[in-house]
Image: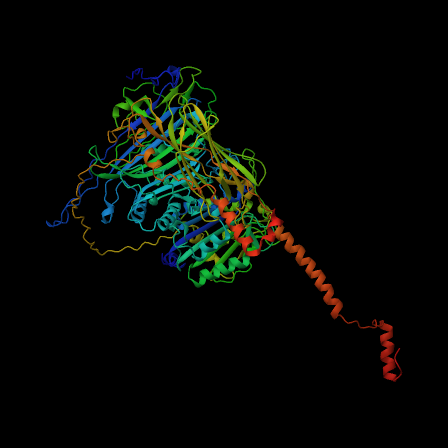
Amino acid sequence: MQAKAGQFFSSGHTNNWAVLVCTSRFWFNYRHVANTLSVYRSVKRLGIPDSHIVLMLADDMACNHRNPKPATVFSHKNMELNVYGDDVEVDYRGYEVTVENFLRVLTGRLPPSTPRSKRLLSDDHSNILIYLTGTSRWNGFLKFQDSEEISNVELADAFEQMWTKRRYNELLFIIDTCQGASMYERFYSPNLMALASSQVGEDSLSHQPDLAIGVHLMDRYTFYLLEFLEDIHPASTANMNDLFKVCPKSQCVSTPGHRTDLFLRDPGNVLITDFFGSVRKVEITMETINLTAPMVHLAVESELKTESQSYVDQLPVAEIIHQKPKQRDWHPPDGFILGLWTLILLVFFKTYGAKHLKHIF
Amino acid sequence: LWKFMSAFQQCLSPWKFQHPLSQQQFAEEERQWEATEVKEADRVPDTMQTPDVPPLTPAKDQFQEELVIRPLHSGDIYASFQFRTMWDTDFLRGSKVSHYRLFPKSLGQVISKFSVRELHISFTQGYWRTMQWGQPFLPSPPGAELWVWFQDTVTDVDGAWKELTNVLSGIFCASLNFIDSTNTVQPSASFKPLGLGNVTDQRFLRYAVLPREIVCTENLTPWKKLLPCGSKAGLAVLMKSEKLFHSSFHSQALHFRPVCQDWKCKSTVWELRQTLNVVFDLHTSGQGKRGERSLKCYSMVIMQACVVFPLQGELFELSPTTPLLSQAVVLGDRRTYSVYDLTNQATFGQTRSLNMLLRWRAAESGDMLRPLLHGERYVAGYGLQTGEIHTLMYNNHPYRAFPVLLLDTVPWYLRLYIHTLTVTSKGRDNKPSYIHYQPSKDRLRPHLLEMLVQLPPNSVTEVTMQFERALLKWTEYTPDPNHGFYVGSSVISALVPSVVAMDTNSTRECPLFSSFFPCKEESSYFMRVYTEPLLVNLPTPDFSMPYNVICLTCTVVAVGYGSLYNLLTRTFQVEEPSPGLAKRLANIIRRLRGVPLL
């Protein structure tokens, strides 16, 4: 009992956040959206509410006109599992998924009118899960929407900003892309743990195509990650070492990598639900608390308007026509321009002599 | 002077010239209409026992929901859900509202913070085909459309508009934050307030449309959460996203405005109307032929009742008759509807479910009623430099002409040549009686063109304008610029002559779908038609060129400079090759002996 209580309070975090990003556009990148949505599904199932999840999808696959089954995104062939669901809330979608917006979400430097659902309002007791998926053709960067990229140095600096601003307690970074390990090579802030689907020089491969939909549905690493997470429930005691074993080379063809040297705790003591689930620490008190008296609405004597109101005329033709005074084009009086030019010419020849006149006529 | 047949299973239309074969049109029009009025909320029990505390005034919110199912001429099914919440509060006088009962709190706070008088927002996927489907109850353009009337106490309308769009983008999970000054306009005569009031200073109106906006489950989820019971009870249980989005047309909208509280109209209440219009395709829902058509699209059994109103669930199949009939005048046409009142136990009979099946009478039906007003728009021309926008407005009334207000918003990157604007009807020039044109400013505001045109009877009016395409800066292109750029739909607002007397008494209890646009006179009704959005290609640069140019230039500079530098600064020294092992050993021995080396 004591050990369990100790474990309950050992991690030091009080709330959980998740930032799930899919960075690819176009229909043939269906699998990246399915990857992100499957992690979203697991995270929601294990308890993190929508208000604590920032979901960024760069393109719409579910209601894409090429999708033979609209409003669905499947992760298994034969359409077994619809990861899109019925109550999904996407915070950043379409063209809003840019490198700048992603970094602003992480560092908290958003314009003042940004709504709450688009902000990462974490504090220094938050455990954050960051999941990125997309394409990257070379070592050290990740492409966003095929038009810009984020480099591993930028990402490391963003995490350092988060650390100095005390925006996280512990952070788990998972990336599923080609040469994913290159993205976490440059991290230098404490309390970061990173997982990637492939090493430098290797490609991450996709899992299986569905012949009815016509595209590959998931990437291998996330497919086996989803299978692993489906067995986790909120009270599960699986730890990070089990997560590192997900998708060995025989299943994934690439070698997943991980990095724990910046993490202060031993990965064997870190529960999966520390990042994928949601902590709700309940404090029970026995004392009575007096609530203040309810706000009293004085019965406002609303003065009744003596004249009744009416609806506005939707197309008041007469009013519209007379809205603008009729514009009459003003023309100068006839012959005015001609007279003006004659005057100018006369003055010119008077001043400079009449001998120039023969050059004109 | 109107005679109408009372055969309740046939659609009615008294005027022969409009539809000569009217008898065999729609087989059945069924409608479920329930009016659930919530009585005054229970008074808070006086547990405080202090005699000087006056009791709280209870809020008199009301909620009503309705579903209209109308089979269309082409065999598709048009379903229109309407949910209306009436909110009796007076937040204008500064009293802070802290108790929300049926009205959604998130929306109420937004409305009181930004002093909004009217808010109309719609998300639509697909285009309403007027010629095949007739007129919709509530029109909406493809994409997202937002127009707002602010209260006259607002001093900075543009600032409030910008913040309001950002807040709404968070509430509805849509990219409404892309609404900025480049796609917002202030119409000068269109979009008059649909609610009560006498202030029509158009300075407080803002209108924006995002034609590219996608509608999917993530927009439906927060929309459903605004209903008092969410999607857990009532008609909202039928709204399954997999069925709703597998359709030809899907439109969800939210309309907020002040309305009369009662027939005297001395006080106002705030009305929030959430509407969902869906057209289910004949072919995608599995039945390719017309004959029996079971509404399998709705196949949910609702077992729970929402806490506030006693609703029963229904499972739709087929039910040929119902004793309750009602007549309503909507869109200038008087029709008879079969009403299924779900609050009435008698509707269900023995079981707790209601099954409905729609069966067509004849294999083929006659001509449908031609819509009186119809609009089309397309881009003409070739190449990537110039083009021409053509807007066609059809007046299908045989002898009546009526005025039409055309509103066009064109983005700044299509530079319109307004001197080429021509309006022709029946081959002759048709001068508009009112033109309002606001030219665009690059990267600041779009073109706004509003014209009041009189459409002659039975004619086509064509409005043409030439334009030139601008070259954008390379950072302004979207990640997929070869898809093209969208131009929002034109809005055609019209007062269309009506064949039956419209009901000008706006507060009589009537079905929701017929009471949206207020009626001022009996002989005509107000209608709004949206044209198609346009997709234009702008001249797109080759985005790989900057990379190629940098590589090439750097290579040339490096090779050229490097060679030159080497030539200028390199010195040459002669170096002897190192001798072999034998020679080195011999040299060591010679050095020891003091003899000159080899």
| Front one among B4 and A102 | B4
Q: Is residue B272 left or right of residue B552?
A: left
In the rendered image, the residue lying farthest to the left is B51
Q: Quadrant of residue A7?
A: bottom left
Q: Position of residue B470 (x, y in %)?
A: 54, 45
Q: Is residue A343 above or below residue B286?
A: below
Q: How many marks?
A: 0
Q: Quadrant of residue B5?
A: top left
Q: Position of residue B103 (x, y in %)?
A: 28, 41
Q: Is residue A181 above or below residue B351?
A: below
Q: Position of residue B34 (x, y in %)?
A: 28, 29
Q: Position of residue B274 (x, y in %)?
A: 34, 36
Q: Is residue A192 visible?
A: yes
| Front one among B377 and A359 | A359
Q: Is residue B537 left or right of residue B274?
A: right
In the rendered image, the residue lying farthest to the bottom is B594
Q: Residue at x 25, y 26 (%)?
A: B344
| Front one among B84 and A273 | B84
Q: Quadrant of the N terminus of chain A?
A: bottom left
Q: Is residue A94 visible?
A: no
Q: Residue at x 44, y 53 (%)?
A: A275
